[in-house]
Image: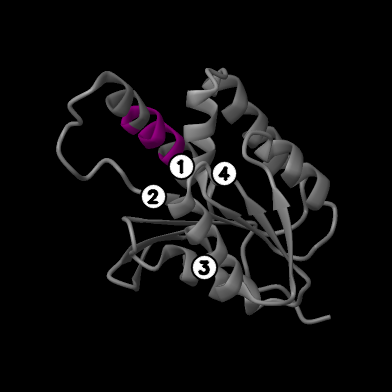
Amino acid sequence: MAAMSLPPLTFVLGGARSGKSRRAEELVTAEPGPWRYVATGQAFDAEMEERIALHKDRRGPGWLTREAPLDLPGALEDLGAEPQPILVDCLTLWLTNLMLGEHDIGHAVQRLDHALDRIRAPVVMVSNEVGLGIVPENRLARAFRDEAGRLHQRVAARADRVLFMVAGLPLTVKDVQAG
């Protein structure tokens, strides 16, 4: 088997349609498979069903998909015993599911940290940057923006590599391997 070039944790962050999922898929498929995909999205309407179908079609064969709209830490622990890379898409959908279900966000994030500490597979996590725009007008949207910002800071702090996607181009924000 070829040596893994992915660090233990890569975080790919960007705005809507910035190319973050495609870039994360490229990083993972550069490694030996089978590749594992942890999907956090739920199709509550036809538009989301279409988005999920487009992601599946783009990935093509060679991917093992695990749906984990709420138990992302459990999915990582289940899949992380093997050395093949795991792509998590995406943290903001996971956070949305937790918030709408009125789950304890702090506890869920602690479980995520614990899972990342225990697995041996490299992980690429994707998330939407939502804090660069205007202050949302309603309380739930502001709470979501704040929770997402805290989650992103936590993941970025522990990540070995952080990429910020802009118009399909990756900007390296952090790369421990590069020095």
Q: Which residue is mark 1?
A: 92
Task: Check contact, mark 3 vs mark 1: CB within 8 A.
Answer: no
Q: Which residue is mark 3?
A: 54
Q: Position of residue 179 (x, y in %)?
A: 47, 65
Tell me the mark number nearer the camera, choosing from 2 and 4: 4
Number of numbered tags placed on the structure image: 4
Q: Which residue is painted at 73% across and 46% down in the image?
A: 76
Looking at this view, name the residue that lies furthest to the left: 134
Q: CA distance from mark 2 to mark 4?
A: 16 Å
Bounds of the magenta segment: 145-152
Visible in this render: residue 76? yes
Q: Earlier in the sequence, mark 3 or mark 1?
A: 3
Residue 19 image-quadrant placement: bottom left
Looking at the picture, tell me which residue is in the foreground, 58 or 22.
58
Q: Which residue is mark 2?
A: 128
Q: Which residue is mark 4?
A: 42
Looking at the picture, tell me which residue is in the foreground, 163 or 105.
105
Residue 1 - label:
none
Label 3 SS: helix
Task: Check contact, mark 1 vs mark 2: CB within 8 A.
Answer: yes
Q: Is residue 40 above or below residue 32?
A: above
Q: Is residue 117 above or below residue 124?
A: above
Label 4 SS: loop
Q: Kindly identify the amino acid type of the residue bearing the numbered disc 3.
A: Leu
Q: Which residue is painted at 52% across and 68% down in the image?
A: 54
